[in-house]
Image (tube, helix red, strand yellow):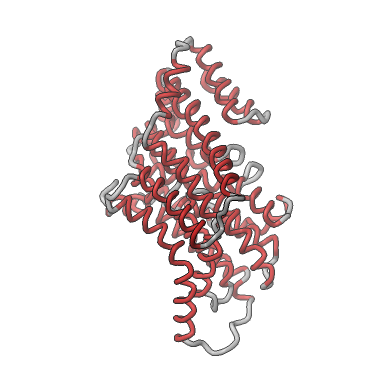
Amino acid sequence: MIFLLILLVLFGLLFLGVPVAFAFGLFTLFLMTKLKFSWDLLGSVPFYSLDSFPLMAIPFFIFAGDLMREGKISGHIIAFINSIIGRIRGSLGAVTVLACMVFGTISGSSVATVSAIGSIMIPEMTKTGYNKRYATALVAAAGFLGTLIPPSIPGVVYAISSGVSIAAIFVATVVPGIILASFYILVNYLIFGRKQPKQAGPFSVKALFQNVASSGKDASWALFMPVIILGGIYGGIFTPTEAAAVSVVYGLFVGWFIYHGLNRKNILGIFRDSALTSCVLLIVLALAGSLLGRVFTVAKAPDYIAELMMQLTTSPTVFLILFNIFVLILGCFLETNTMVIILTPIFVPIAQKYGIHPIHFGAILLLNVEIGLITPPFAGNLFVACRVSNLQLDEIVRPLLPFLFVCFPTLAITTYIPWVSMWLPRLLGVG
């Protein structure tokens, strides 16, 4: 009972609008006082938790994503994809979905993907007859594919919090991401694509190849970045942290000298924004992921919750149903990385008691928290998409529903068919 009361204190602070880092700090102080913990933990645990080589991947990936977003990378990616499927009815919607996937291999952030792709694709879709509210909803939904397709900042947070391989978690969500992207493209075709007229003019294979070759040449520098990051990691050339550092150097070079999107006017702003984003996340990770996690562990909170769950059910199937419902509800109110930090140290040990592999459980958790990005009232992707299109949140909720609906069969497939998330890590020898 005491743990439920204490958790209410945390959620109360968050709902009152207290900044996440300070809410966790106050909550941890309250918990330590209540449970009579030594105050020595306040200095040592957060410091040593941040003194971590794998953790450096987070600020590097954030910085690399910002560099590539501002370096005109998204426009070249979109042009290349459009050259391949541009003649298909409803092609711009499909291009948006695929562009979010490709940009996700660079940024590792859903919000960055929505901002970069949405600023280009929403006006383009509107020009070709798409309803602006529908186009905004599509970009918001497709944006979180940017996290399911590696690299993934929430994936790094989960891996560090759970102690599993970052490389394994990166690829665990690839197949679920592809399944969900396929559903999105199908929904777009059924709702809008089939209503469009077929492309006028004869089809020419020669013209298609010429167009693809031309746009591919322009986008080659952009498309080579995922090859460096993922190829380097899974080829054993460098670690995820080293890959993130290499992506920063590559992003600076391409954005400044090739695409000329970076210059002396905007580079300092990019440094500042990336640093602020990294600091906020790392402070939360230090207070919640390490200090609060240590307090929870010593106080045997996971054991208490596991015992409570075991009293409710001994079935892994029922446990996962309850877990999914709980996280989906929580996702309406909390930010993605915050949820991963809170839930991982509590539920990973419980999942293991039910015989669920931590990599499989990580894929379930990450898909759940990403769905939270498009479930109001706290929906980061919706806020960014609305800001890009100058719409109000309530204007895009209705067109969003079909895309939200197909998230649930994807979640069910990921949850109850472990092969979906475990096949690729095992194939690459990291799971």
Foreground residue among 168 and 297:
168
Q: Provide residue 317's location: percent of width, then percent of height.
A: 41, 42
Q: Provide residue 200's location: percent of width, then percent of height.
A: 60, 86
Residue situated furthest bottom in the rendering: 202
State the residue at coordinates (39%, 49%).
Answer: 246
248 lies above or below 92: above
Q: Provide residue 358's location: percent of width, then percent of height.
A: 35, 39
State the residue at coordinates (70%, 66%).
Answer: 131
Q: Is residue 304 visible?
A: no
Looking at the image, how many numbered discs can be counted on the residues?
0
Q: Is residue 334 visible?
A: yes
Foreground residue among 256 and 221:
256
Question: In this image, 343 relative to 133: left or right?
Answer: left
Q: Provide residue 378's location: percent of width, then percent of height.
A: 63, 41
211 lies above or below 309: below
Residue situated furthest front in the rendering: 264
347 lies above or below 175: above
